[in-house]
Amino acid sequence: MDIALRYARSKGDKYHEYFIEAQLNVLDRILEGEPYYASTFYIPGEWTPLLDRPVLYMERISGFAAANRLVRHLSDKRVQASTPGCDCTYQLMFQCLLDEGLIPPPSGYLAMSYACNNAFSFSKASAARYDVPCYSINVPRIPNMHTISDLGRSLARMGASLNVCLDSDRLTNAIKLSNSALAIKNQIDQLRILYPGILDATDGFKLFTIYNDLGSNHAVAVLEQLLATIEKRISGYRPPLGSKWIWLGVIPLYRNNLLMETECRLGGRFVYEELFSFGDLEPIQADSFYKDLARRIVNSHFFSVQRRADFIMDIAAKMGVEGIVCFSQRNCSFLPPTVPYLRRTLKSTGMAFMDFTGDVIDPNYFDEGKYWLTMEEWTGMQNGGACRVR
Ligand code: SF4
């Protein structure tokens, strides 16, 4: 991570620099022996500045480990690691980092069953294994008129257990930072729609977990730098010449340049990636803090398959997109079950749709040869049968 930080600095790549620097600070504290919480996605980042110890988002550190191939032969480790209650390699990777002593065991877990039941059950089992507390919320996945209030109350209970003080300047500041970060993110989204391809989708993937940092100074700094970079590009902007595509799901993290390579070889442009889209989120208020957090989660377009499909169709129409590529993580219970519905719905609008299954953490489960063959054929079909492979 230190090398990645130096590289970003040497390139003058401010948004990456600030992003990596913040991750490195958390990791340094943990490696120096500070007790920490291991957390699942969607645990509110606004809490982080208020807690008595650093928070390490498990998917983020697992993704980093995969990108840098820190653990080899991951599939062989499944048996040795006897990973509790999960099938997803994100959690297996986290367990391997613990087992191999690359990071110390956490002093507690923060877990929500949304987005991910696998991470939720892993957190509970792992907490039992290390005999540490697991603060958890079971989020109902079928929204009804009570879901937001119920989830708000659960978040409030969990916040109280973690000694989050509602009446504090630090919380007021975290809310202010969170709202500022989201306002900047909305501006970025609007510019991306007006100028398709102005940001590399690969950069979107590098930054999408900034969602976990809402409420921190560095989230504002990262997004401000990203916005400034995009604004500088506007005067020289040229629309993409080839097809425009959207990427759904994660990318194989050990092949970080896959999208750029696909664009070069096949002559199109990924103009949007779904994971870096947080939706049009309303600001959070101090006096309705927990209910607003709950609303943000339940109103996310990932929460309902219909909302997800509508969101993608809307973005695709606004950007004049010709095709959608959907990458499903093996054994993931979150987004892959929605693929048949998405395929049907998007194809019925005349949108070209291609889906792959693989493992974004374990390269043994990604058949790259097949990916290229399928993509060459698919993009050829979009161009009237003439494959535009370069
Ligand atoms: S890929 Fe799916 S199962 Fe794995 S951590 Fe992410 S949401 Fe959970």
Image (cartoon, grey):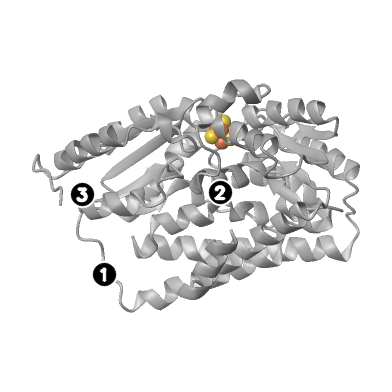
Q: Quadrant of ligand 1?
A: top right
- Mark 2 belongs to which amino acid? Phe
- Ligand 1 contact, mark 2 (Cβ < 8 Å): no
The image quadrant of residue 58 is top right
Residue drawn at the location 50% of the way across and 32% of the way down? 73
Q: Residues within 10 Å of mark 3 (few under 14, many from 20)?
A: many
Indicate which disc residue 11 carries.
none
**SS for callout 2:** helix
Task: From the image, tell me which residue sits under label 2.
Answer: 64
Between 259 and 291, the residue placed more toward the observer is 259
Q: Are marks 1 and 2 in contact (CB under 8 Å)?
A: no
Indicate which disc residue 266 carries.
3
- Mark 3 belongs to which amino acid? Leu
Residue drawn at the location 64% of the way across and 27% of the way down? 117
Residue drawn at the location 15% of the way across and 52% of the way down? 390
**SS for callout 3:** helix
Q: Residues within 10 Å of mark 2 (few under 14, many from 20)?
A: some
In the image, which is nearer the foreground, mark 3 or mark 2? 2
Along the horizontal axis of the image, is 259 left or right of 71?
Answer: left
Question: Quick one: label 3 or label 2, which is nearer the N terminus?
Answer: 2
Indicate which disc residue 238 carries.
1
The image quadrant of residue 216 is bottom right
Which quarter of the figure is the N terminus placed in?
bottom right
Q: CA distance from mark 1 to mark 2?
A: 33 Å
Q: CA distance from mark 3 to mark 2?
A: 28 Å
